[in-house]
Image (cartoon, coloured by chain):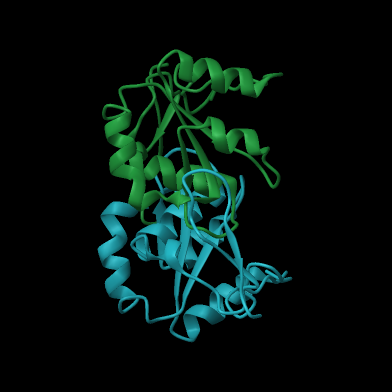
Chain colours: A cyan, B green
Amino acid sequence: MEVWGGKSYFKVEFVDNPKKIVKSWREKGGLVVHLTMYGKMIDDMIDEITKASKNFTLPLLVVIGSEKVEGWYYYNSDYNIGIGNQPHSEVSALAIFLDRIYKGEELYIHFSDAKFYIIPQLKGKRVVKTDK
Amino acid sequence: MEVWGGKSYFKVEFVDNPKKIVKSWREKGGLVVHLTMYGKMIDDMIDEITKASKNFTLPLLVVIGSEKVEGWYYYNSDYNIGIGNQPHSEVSALAIFLDRIYKGEELYIHFSDAKFYIIPQLKGKRVVKTDK
Protein backbone atom coordinates (compact mmCIF):
# COMPACT_ATOMS: atom_id res chain seq x y z
CA MET A 1 0.00 0.00 0.00
CA GLU A 2 3.01 2.28 0.37
CA VAL A 3 3.50 2.49 -3.39
CA TRP A 4 0.10 1.88 -4.94
CA GLY A 5 -2.03 3.51 -2.22
CA GLY A 6 -5.12 2.34 -0.37
CA LYS A 7 -4.00 3.01 3.24
CA SER A 8 -7.21 4.92 3.90
CA TYR A 9 -9.19 2.14 2.17
CA PHE A 10 -7.72 -1.13 3.50
CA LYS A 11 -6.92 -2.15 7.08
CA VAL A 12 -5.47 -5.54 7.99
CA GLU A 13 -6.12 -6.77 11.53
CA PHE A 14 -5.85 -10.03 13.50
CA VAL A 15 -8.65 -10.64 16.00
CA ASP A 16 -8.83 -13.06 18.91
CA ASN A 17 -12.57 -13.57 18.88
CA PRO A 18 -14.09 -13.52 15.39
CA LYS A 19 -17.48 -14.68 16.72
CA LYS A 20 -17.66 -11.53 18.85
CA ILE A 21 -17.08 -9.45 15.71
CA VAL A 22 -19.90 -11.27 13.87
CA LYS A 23 -22.30 -10.85 16.84
CA SER A 24 -21.61 -7.15 17.37
CA TRP A 25 -21.70 -6.49 13.60
CA ARG A 26 -25.27 -7.75 13.45
CA GLU A 27 -26.27 -6.08 16.75
CA LYS A 28 -25.17 -2.74 15.25
CA GLY A 29 -27.42 -3.36 12.22
CA GLY A 30 -24.77 -4.62 9.80
CA LEU A 31 -25.17 -7.60 7.47
CA VAL A 32 -23.04 -10.73 7.65
CA VAL A 33 -22.47 -12.84 4.53
CA HIS A 34 -20.64 -16.15 4.86
CA LEU A 35 -19.11 -17.41 1.60
CA THR A 36 -19.25 -21.19 1.52
CA MET A 37 -19.53 -23.82 -1.20
CA TYR A 38 -22.57 -25.16 0.70
CA GLY A 39 -24.46 -21.87 0.37
CA LYS A 40 -27.10 -20.61 -2.02
CA MET A 41 -25.73 -19.59 -5.40
CA ILE A 42 -24.63 -15.95 -5.56
CA ASP A 43 -26.64 -15.28 -8.73
CA ASP A 44 -29.87 -16.39 -7.00
CA MET A 45 -29.22 -14.22 -3.92
CA ILE A 46 -27.53 -11.04 -5.16
CA ASP A 47 -30.83 -9.14 -5.51
CA GLU A 48 -32.00 -10.14 -2.02
CA ILE A 49 -28.63 -9.18 -0.48
CA THR A 50 -28.65 -5.87 -2.35
CA LYS A 51 -32.12 -5.13 -0.92
CA ALA A 52 -31.34 -6.37 2.61
CA SER A 53 -28.19 -4.21 2.68
CA LYS A 54 -30.16 -1.24 1.36
CA ASN A 55 -28.05 -1.20 -1.79
CA PHE A 56 -24.91 -1.85 0.25
CA THR A 57 -25.33 1.22 2.39
CA LEU A 58 -25.43 -1.01 5.48
CA PRO A 59 -22.01 -2.19 6.69
CA LEU A 60 -21.29 -5.61 5.14
CA LEU A 61 -19.08 -8.21 6.82
CA VAL A 62 -17.92 -11.04 4.54
CA VAL A 63 -16.84 -14.19 6.38
CA ILE A 64 -14.71 -16.74 4.53
CA GLY A 65 -13.19 -19.71 6.27
CA SER A 66 -10.61 -22.14 5.00
CA GLU A 67 -11.28 -25.87 4.89
CA LYS A 68 -13.07 -26.39 8.19
CA VAL A 69 -15.52 -23.69 9.32
CA GLU A 70 -17.42 -24.10 12.60
CA GLY A 71 -21.16 -24.70 12.21
CA TRP A 72 -21.69 -21.59 14.36
CA TYR A 73 -20.91 -19.30 11.41
CA TYR A 74 -23.51 -21.00 9.19
CA TYR A 75 -26.23 -20.25 11.74
CA ASN A 76 -25.05 -16.81 12.83
CA SER A 77 -24.53 -15.23 9.45
CA ASP A 78 -27.40 -13.52 7.64
CA TYR A 79 -26.58 -15.32 4.41
CA ASN A 80 -24.60 -18.38 3.40
CA ILE A 81 -23.61 -17.77 -0.21
CA GLY A 82 -21.93 -20.10 -2.69
CA ILE A 83 -19.67 -18.74 -5.42
CA GLY A 84 -20.51 -21.95 -7.25
CA ASN A 85 -20.99 -25.11 -5.19
CA GLN A 86 -17.53 -26.57 -5.75
CA PRO A 87 -14.44 -26.28 -3.54
CA HIS A 88 -12.07 -23.60 -4.82
CA SER A 89 -9.95 -20.69 -3.65
CA GLU A 90 -11.28 -18.43 -0.89
CA VAL A 91 -9.53 -15.47 -2.59
CA SER A 92 -11.35 -16.22 -5.85
CA ALA A 93 -14.65 -16.49 -3.99
CA LEU A 94 -14.11 -13.07 -2.42
CA ALA A 95 -13.02 -11.60 -5.78
CA ILE A 96 -16.11 -12.85 -7.63
CA PHE A 97 -18.42 -11.81 -4.75
CA LEU A 98 -16.98 -8.27 -4.74
CA ASP A 99 -17.14 -8.17 -8.53
CA ARG A 100 -20.85 -8.98 -8.36
CA ILE A 101 -21.72 -6.42 -5.69
CA TYR A 102 -19.56 -3.67 -7.24
CA LYS A 103 -20.79 -4.71 -10.70
CA GLY A 104 -17.22 -4.62 -12.02
CA GLU A 105 -16.67 -1.01 -10.86
CA GLU A 106 -14.12 -2.14 -8.29
CA LEU A 107 -11.59 -2.54 -11.11
CA TYR A 108 -11.67 1.22 -11.67
CA ILE A 109 -10.99 2.32 -8.08
CA HIS A 110 -7.87 4.56 -7.80
CA PHE A 111 -6.37 5.53 -4.45
CA SER A 112 -5.58 9.18 -3.80
CA ASP A 113 -2.50 8.26 -1.74
CA ALA A 114 -0.88 6.26 -4.57
CA LYS A 115 2.70 7.29 -5.41
CA PHE A 116 2.39 5.76 -8.89
CA TYR A 117 -0.37 4.81 -11.27
CA ILE A 118 -0.42 2.70 -14.40
CA ILE A 119 -1.24 3.72 -17.97
CA PRO A 120 -2.62 0.44 -19.38
CA GLN A 121 -0.56 -0.91 -22.27
CA LEU A 122 -1.04 -3.69 -24.80
CA LYS A 123 2.74 -4.33 -24.69
CA GLY A 124 5.26 -3.39 -22.01
CA LYS A 125 4.76 -1.23 -18.90
CA ARG A 126 3.97 2.48 -18.43
CA VAL A 127 3.94 3.86 -14.92
CA VAL A 128 3.49 7.52 -13.98
CA LYS A 129 4.69 9.11 -10.73
CA THR A 130 2.07 11.16 -8.84
CA ASP A 131 2.82 14.21 -6.74
CA LYS A 132 2.56 12.16 -3.53
CA MET B 1 -10.49 -33.85 -7.17
CA GLU B 2 -10.92 -37.32 -5.70
CA VAL B 3 -14.11 -36.28 -3.87
CA TRP B 4 -15.58 -33.41 -5.88
CA GLY B 5 -14.49 -34.56 -9.35
CA GLY B 6 -12.78 -32.76 -12.20
CA LYS B 7 -9.96 -35.23 -12.94
CA SER B 8 -10.87 -35.23 -16.62
CA TYR B 9 -11.14 -31.42 -16.52
CA PHE B 10 -8.08 -30.25 -14.55
CA LYS B 11 -4.43 -31.27 -14.90
CA VAL B 12 -1.64 -29.84 -12.74
CA GLU B 13 1.86 -29.95 -14.20
CA PHE B 14 5.28 -28.38 -13.47
CA VAL B 15 7.26 -27.42 -16.56
CA ASP B 16 10.95 -26.61 -16.93
CA ASN B 17 10.66 -24.24 -19.83
CA PRO B 18 7.49 -22.11 -19.75
CA LYS B 19 8.72 -19.95 -22.65
CA LYS B 20 8.81 -23.05 -24.86
CA ILE B 21 5.16 -23.71 -23.95
CA VAL B 22 4.18 -20.14 -24.88
CA LYS B 23 6.07 -20.32 -28.21
CA SER B 24 4.67 -23.69 -29.29
CA TRP B 25 1.16 -22.68 -28.12
CA ARG B 26 1.17 -19.78 -30.56
CA GLU B 27 2.89 -21.77 -33.33
CA LYS B 28 0.03 -24.29 -33.11
CA GLY B 29 -2.52 -21.48 -33.56
CA GLY B 30 -3.46 -20.99 -29.91
CA LEU B 31 -3.90 -17.64 -28.17
CA VAL B 32 -1.76 -16.48 -25.25
CA VAL B 33 -3.16 -13.98 -22.75
CA HIS B 34 -0.86 -12.58 -20.06
CA LEU B 35 -2.70 -11.19 -17.01
CA THR B 36 -0.77 -8.24 -15.64
CA MET B 37 -1.68 -5.05 -13.78
CA TYR B 38 0.17 -3.17 -16.53
CA GLY B 39 -2.12 -4.51 -19.27
CA LYS B 40 -5.18 -3.13 -21.02
CA MET B 41 -8.35 -3.33 -18.95
CA ILE B 42 -10.25 -6.61 -19.37
CA ASP B 43 -13.54 -4.82 -20.05
CA ASP B 44 -11.98 -2.93 -23.00
CA MET B 45 -10.47 -6.08 -24.51
CA ILE B 46 -12.95 -8.91 -23.85
CA ASP B 47 -14.73 -8.44 -27.20
CA GLU B 48 -11.46 -8.43 -29.15
CA ILE B 49 -10.19 -11.52 -27.33
CA THR B 50 -13.52 -13.30 -27.89
CA LYS B 51 -13.23 -12.55 -31.63
CA ALA B 52 -9.51 -13.40 -31.89
CA SER B 53 -10.13 -16.73 -30.13
CA LYS B 54 -13.11 -17.42 -32.40
CA ASN B 55 -15.45 -17.35 -29.42
CA PHE B 56 -12.94 -19.32 -27.35
CA THR B 57 -12.84 -22.24 -29.74
CA LEU B 58 -9.08 -21.69 -30.18
CA PRO B 59 -6.95 -23.09 -27.32
CA LEU B 60 -6.32 -20.30 -24.80
CA LEU B 61 -3.22 -20.16 -22.60
CA VAL B 62 -3.45 -17.76 -19.64
CA VAL B 63 -0.07 -16.68 -18.25
CA ILE B 64 0.05 -15.16 -14.75
CA GLY B 65 3.30 -14.41 -13.01
CA SER B 66 3.92 -13.45 -9.43
CA GLU B 67 5.73 -10.25 -8.51
CA LYS B 68 8.50 -10.16 -11.11
CA VAL B 69 7.63 -11.35 -14.63
CA GLU B 70 10.30 -11.30 -17.33
CA GLY B 71 9.74 -8.71 -20.08
CA TRP B 72 9.78 -11.60 -22.57
CA TYR B 73 6.24 -12.59 -21.63
CA TYR B 74 4.92 -9.08 -22.27
CA TYR B 75 6.23 -9.18 -25.83
CA ASN B 76 5.51 -12.82 -26.61
CA SER B 77 1.90 -12.98 -25.47
CA ASP B 78 -0.93 -12.05 -27.81
CA TYR B 79 -2.55 -9.88 -25.16
CA ASN B 80 -1.47 -8.24 -21.92
CA ILE B 81 -4.67 -7.83 -19.92
CA GLY B 82 -5.26 -6.01 -16.64
CA ILE B 83 -7.92 -7.19 -14.20
CA GLY B 84 -7.84 -3.61 -12.95
CA ASN B 85 -4.52 -1.76 -12.93
CA GLN B 86 -3.71 -2.28 -9.26
CA PRO B 87 -1.58 -4.99 -7.67
CA HIS B 88 -3.71 -7.78 -6.23
CA SER B 89 -3.98 -11.55 -6.03
CA GLU B 90 -3.07 -13.62 -9.10
CA VAL B 91 -5.81 -16.12 -8.13
CA SER B 92 -8.39 -13.32 -8.08
CA ALA B 93 -7.18 -12.09 -11.45
CA LEU B 94 -7.62 -15.56 -12.94
CA ALA B 95 -11.04 -15.95 -11.27
CA ILE B 96 -12.37 -12.65 -12.66
CA PHE B 97 -10.87 -13.33 -16.10
CA LEU B 98 -12.52 -16.76 -16.28
CA ASP B 99 -15.77 -15.29 -14.97
CA ARG B 100 -15.73 -12.77 -17.80
CA ILE B 101 -14.99 -15.27 -20.57
CA TYR B 102 -17.42 -17.90 -19.23
CA LYS B 103 -19.95 -15.12 -18.49
CA GLY B 104 -20.57 -16.58 -15.03
CA GLU B 105 -21.44 -20.02 -16.42
CA GLU B 106 -18.32 -21.53 -14.87
CA LEU B 107 -20.10 -21.48 -11.49
CA TYR B 108 -22.56 -24.08 -12.79
CA ILE B 109 -20.05 -26.64 -14.05
CA HIS B 110 -20.55 -30.09 -12.41
CA PHE B 111 -18.06 -32.92 -12.86
CA SER B 112 -19.33 -36.35 -13.88
CA ASP B 113 -16.68 -38.08 -11.76
CA ALA B 114 -17.75 -36.33 -8.53
CA LYS B 115 -18.47 -38.69 -5.61
CA PHE B 116 -20.61 -36.02 -3.92
CA TYR B 117 -22.49 -32.93 -4.92
CA ILE B 118 -24.00 -30.09 -2.91
CA ILE B 119 -27.63 -29.05 -2.59
CA PRO B 120 -27.26 -25.29 -1.91
CA GLN B 121 -28.65 -24.25 1.45
CA LEU B 122 -29.36 -20.93 3.14
CA LYS B 123 -28.38 -22.50 6.48
CA GLY B 124 -26.27 -25.60 7.17
CA LYS B 125 -24.89 -28.15 4.68
CA ARG B 126 -26.59 -30.69 2.41
CA VAL B 127 -24.41 -33.09 0.48
CA VAL B 128 -25.63 -35.96 -1.69
CA LYS B 129 -23.59 -39.06 -2.59
CA THR B 130 -23.48 -39.95 -6.29
CA ASP B 131 -23.25 -43.46 -7.69
CA LYS B 132 -19.51 -43.01 -8.39
Residue B115 is situated, as x and y percent measured from the top left of the image, at: 45, 23
In the image, residue A54 sits, relative to residue A79, either above or below, namely below
Q: Residue B64's x, y, as percent? A: 58, 38
Residue farthest to the bottom, as pictured: A28
Q: Quadrant of the C terminus of chain B?
A: top left
Instruction: Give the image location of residue B63, x and y in percent.
Output: 55, 34
Q: In the rendered image, is residue B102 in sight?
A: no
Residue at x 59% of width, y 34% of height: B73
Specify the quadrant of the image occupied by residue A33. bottom left
Pick the residue in front: A79 or B124.
A79
Residue at image point 65% right, 39% down: B71
Res A35 seen here: yes
* Total marks in image: 0
Determine the residue positioned at 64% across, 69% down.
A18
Q: Is residue A25 above or below residue A122?
A: below
Left or right of residue B130: residue A34: right
Q: Is residue B50 above or below residue A104?
A: above
Q: Above or below — where is B62 with respect to B27?
A: below
Q: Residue at x 30, y 35 (%)?
A: B50
Locate residue A9, reporting x and y percent: 57, 76
